[in-house]
Structure formats: structure tokens, C-alpha cells
Image (tube, grey):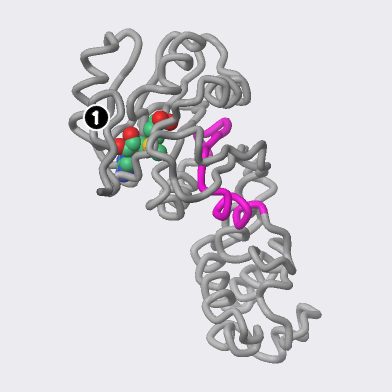
Amino acid sequence: MDDHSTQGHRARKRFGQNFLSDPNIIRKIVDAIRPQPGEKLVEIGPGLGAMTEPLIERVGHLHVVEIDRDLIARLHERYTPAQVTVHEGDALKFDFGSLGAPLRIVGNLPYNISTPILFHLAEFASAVKDMTFMLQKEVVMRMVAEPGSEEYGRLSVMLQYRFRMGRLFDVPPGAFRPAPKVMSSIVRMAPLPVEQLGARDEALLGRIVTAAFGQRRKTLKNTLRDFMTDADFAALGLDPGLRGERLSVAQFVAIANHCTARDAGG
Ligand code: SAM
């Protein structure tokens, strides 16, 4: 059986439902978020409200985005509109910009959609003050990985381009009902100032990074052949025999900006 009943609710695997049940861990996470009265705070996937309740106590009012209709009905029963504004639907499609700024986003995220949700949230970085999430540890390790490490890849580069990130602490499977198979970690993400970002064409940066990590065993000469010639590598002082995992975020930005300038004839 995949299902598991918690507080009379059958946990749905397709919505990545593992509910926090350890009061000490819940307190530790909420303390790490450090919510202040009156802040604009949104929780993704409140579920059965493990974090929702203590968050409301500290901020007064909370926005939540939840996809599961049964859980949405419970939220409406349990909280008044003055306490919680419930946004019903898919967080992957939700316009976080509509809530205004500066926005703090938190959540024990559904692990089955962790990468797409991080990329979706990155689009709202300019409206965001910070984000604190629980994700599977393996994903958090990739988010914060340094060049040259095995975990370093597209997720590391694209998120580190836009955010300062730090892994705060790990959470064991026993803190959840039902218990997930994997270890989890808490990660904090704070958007970098816009003037620090530096890519003149961010879509191009995304395409270059995707290509560079598309075939991890291949060198940049191969993976970036649609973007860079030997002369381009030479102009940047980059060894085309390297693999993508060796390049820093700043070097990827330099490649993208070189291509932009070259194609503009500058
Ligand atoms: N915050 C609760 C806790 O810590 O106990 C629940 C966390 S559970 C890992 C993930 C929550 O996200 C569930 O409530 C689930 O229904 C919700 N969810 C799953 N996919 C979603 C989506 N695409 N958009 C919004 N919420 C989603």
C-alpha cells in the first residue's frame, strides 16, 4: 500500500505528501525562518498545517498555495480568512508576483516536483526577500555544490547565478508521517542584487548551461559546439578540453556574454 492515513487524511503519493510530525523539528524550522509580524509570507503545500499554525502565530496572516482539494477544505474549516488566504491550485503555475513584494516563501516542498518548482520560483526572484525550503538532501547538495564536485550541474549554476544559498540542517525520515525513503535538508535562498547578476541574455545563459551539462563526460568543445568556436574559447582564455563541471558560474556568464557581444557584432 502506498497510502498512509494521517489525521484521517490518506497521504497521496502523487502530491508528494509526507507530513511533518516531529514538534522539535517543526519548531527548529520555524525558528530558522524567523517570521516577523506583518511580513508577507507564503507557504507552498501547507498540507495538514504542521508549519502553518506556528507561522500564523508569528506573522498574523499567511498566504498558502495547496493543490489537494481535501486539504484545501480542511484549511478553510480550520482558519479564518484573516489568518490564511488559501490559493487553490498548482504552485508550478502560481503567479507569486501577484502577492506583492517583498515576499518570503517557505515550504516543505513536494519532492516529486522539486526541480521544476525551483526554476519556476527563480522567475520571481526580484519580488522575493528570501525562501526557506525543505527538500530531499540529494537535491539540496546539488543546489549548493561547488565547481569540480560530482553534484555540480545545471541546477547549481542556474540557482547560484541568482541566489545566495546555504544548507541549514538535515531532517531524518522519522520526522514525517509517512516517512520518506530519503534524508531531507533545509535550504535558504536569498536573491542576489540585480546589478550583480551580469548575464546580458539570461535565456542564452540557460541554453549554454543546459548544453554544457547535457553530456557530462564530454568536453566543452563538444557540448558547446553550437555556441563557441576554438577562437571564441581562445578569446576568453578558456580550455575547450575542460568539462562543464569545472566552470564557475562567472565563467558560464562570461561565455554567454561573449556570444551575445559577438553575435551583436561588438
Ligand atoms: N507542509 C506540510 C508538512 O510539512 O507537513 C506538507 C508537506 S508535503 C511534503 C507537500 C505538500 O504540497 C502537500 O500538502 C501537497 O498536497 C502539496 N502539493 C503537492 N504538489 C503541489 C503543487 N503542485 N502545488 C501546490 N501544492 C502541492
The magenta stretch spans residue 129:
yes
Image quadrant holding the C terminus, namely: bottom right
Q: Is residue 219 above or below residue 34?
A: below
Task: Report whether residue 91 is seen.
Answer: no
Q: Name the quadrant containing residue 80.
A: top left
Q: Is residue 85 above or below residue 93?
A: above
Task: Report whether residue 128 is seen.
Answer: yes
**Is 204 on the left-hand or right-hand side of 233?**
left
Q: Amino acid at mark 1?
A: His
Q: Where's residue 187, x and y in %?
A: 60, 40
The residue located at (66%, 44%) in the rendering is: 165
Q: Residue lying furthest front in this view?
A: 1
The residue located at (44%, 50%) in the rendering is: 114
Q: Which residue is the site of mark 1?
A: 9
Q: Where's residue 122, x and y in %?
A: 49, 47
Q: Where's residue 170, x and y in %?
A: 62, 40
> Dot 1 surroundings within 10 Å: few (below 14), some, or many (20 or more)?
some
The magenta stretch spans residue 79:
no
User: How many numbered marks, from 0 up?
Assistant: 1
The residue located at (46%, 50%) in the rendering is: 181
Which residues, given as a range, are shown in magenta? 126-144
